Amino acid sequence: MIQKIQQAFRGRFNKEPLVIGAPGRVNLIGEHTDYNYGFVLPGAVDKRIYVAIAPNETNTVNVFASQFNESYSFSLDITGPQKGWMNYLLGVSYHIQQQGKKIGGVDLVIDGDIPVGAGMSSSAALCSAYGFALNELFKLGLSRMDLAFIGQKTEHTFVGVKCGIMDQFASLHGKKGHVMKLDCRSLEYEYIPFDFPEYKIVLVNSMVSHSLAGSEYNVRRQQCEEGVAILQKHYPEIKSLRDVEPAQLLQHQDELPPVVFDRCSFIVYEKERLLRGCDALKQNDLTTFGKLMYATHEGLSKKYAVSCTELDFLAECAQHISGVAGARMMGGGFGGCTINIVQTDAVDTFTQKIQAAFNGLFKITPDVYVTQIEGGTNILA
Ligand code: GLA
């Protein structure tokens, strides 16, 4: 991929590029908890967005996206969103300049092997790769965490998804063989080894693109905030659902609209599952971890209502295949992938069985990705 993108860049712009790679992510447990200022447990994966880039001494950014065979140019005097995937580049360029940093025009080619719309955060990876590249080229002195926030602001203001910080954080901070327990309030994080040679993290794509999920995602966020506002009347110290104990929520259940109660209860118990899950991982106990994953799926589907028929089918089906320690839908929801922890020597039969079962019902064969946990965004050439 590195050579391919270098050649594409030289052919188009006739000079040598810097090449940056930014990974997609998985999340083992702790879903929709990031914007509730709780904990998440993501890891960067071996699928990346690649950016080949060089300054062009103008005020214009010229982009060629190999995957879509599309080119686009924009001036750095951007004021707001345009349309489609270029909003990620527009937003990052804009927010970097808003921080008082000076950048110049660049030529770039983008390529990658993160499936788009599969819930593996290809958009966060694009923001990370491009922001990281500008930071290098123009010596901006931004930290990886600064770049993560620039990516998040881009989603909020140029794309309209009020996402948390998990995806951008994971793409920028990944470490080979480790997942990251991130406290989304203090931003402290801990690398926890995911060192189970006898198991693989296997993603199964529901083949439902999650691209329309943004509006529902924002509604979930609002519902959580509505719950916090009600609980705050009794407990002024509560700043987000992360601070809520199950007993506090239950005590005020009848003051919350039923839907808001369901959303809040998922988040409150998801925090407990995450904390127990981290302990289980540290004790090499994948059996307990797997059970927590199934419980997370149940909550995401029934209480948080972000699953869909295809994801429910995949999670349920995985439970009945031997060699599977745990399975659940992953990421924002409404499509994308399930994440499955599968014994290495059972991966082939798992793949065959789940593909056949899914195909029998939905008449389409789901893509399966056997992933490795890799390092974060970096210079590759
Ligand atoms: C999307 C968002 C993240 C996070 C997850 C759900 O991936 O971008 O911030 O909220 O959904 O855990």
Image (tube, rainbow, N blue to C red):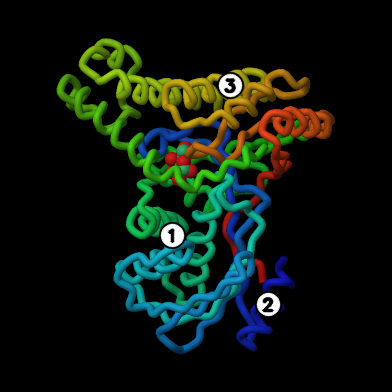
Answer left or right for 341 relative to 103: right
Residue 320: x percent and y percent?
72, 18
Measure the alpha-carbon separation of dots 1 and 3: 33 Å
Q: Mark 2 packing: few (<14 Cα in 10 Å), some, or many (20+)?
A: some
Residue 141: x percent and y percent?
42, 68
Q: Quadrant of residue 23?
A: bottom right
Front residue of this view, candidates 231 and 275? 231
Q: Earlier in the sequence, mark 3 or mark 2?
A: 2
Q: Earlier in the sequence, mark 1 or mark 3?
A: 1
Q: In this figure, which residue is indicated by the disc labeled 3?
A: 294
**Quarter of the figure that contains the N terminus:** bottom right
Above or below, comparing residue 104 to residue 185 in the picture: below
Residue at 40% across, 26% down: 267
Measure the alpha-carbon separation of dots 1 and 2: 26 Å
Q: Quadrant of residue 183?
A: top left
Q: Mark 1 packing: few (<14 Cα in 10 Å), some, or many (20+)?
A: many
Residue 273: x percent and y percent?
49, 22
Measure the alpha-carbon separation of dots 3 and 2: 44 Å
Which label was assigned to residue 8?
2
* Secondary element type, mark 1: helix
Q: In this figure, which residue is indicated by the disc labeled 1?
A: 147
Residue at 43% across, 26% down: 271
Residue 32: x percent and y percent?
43, 35
Q: Quadrant of residue 179?
A: top right
- Would residue 235 be seen by someone viewing this image from the given angle? yes
**Quarter of the figure that contains the C terminus:** bottom right
Q: Earlier in the sequence, mark 1 or mark 2?
A: 2
Residue at 78% across, 29% down: 350
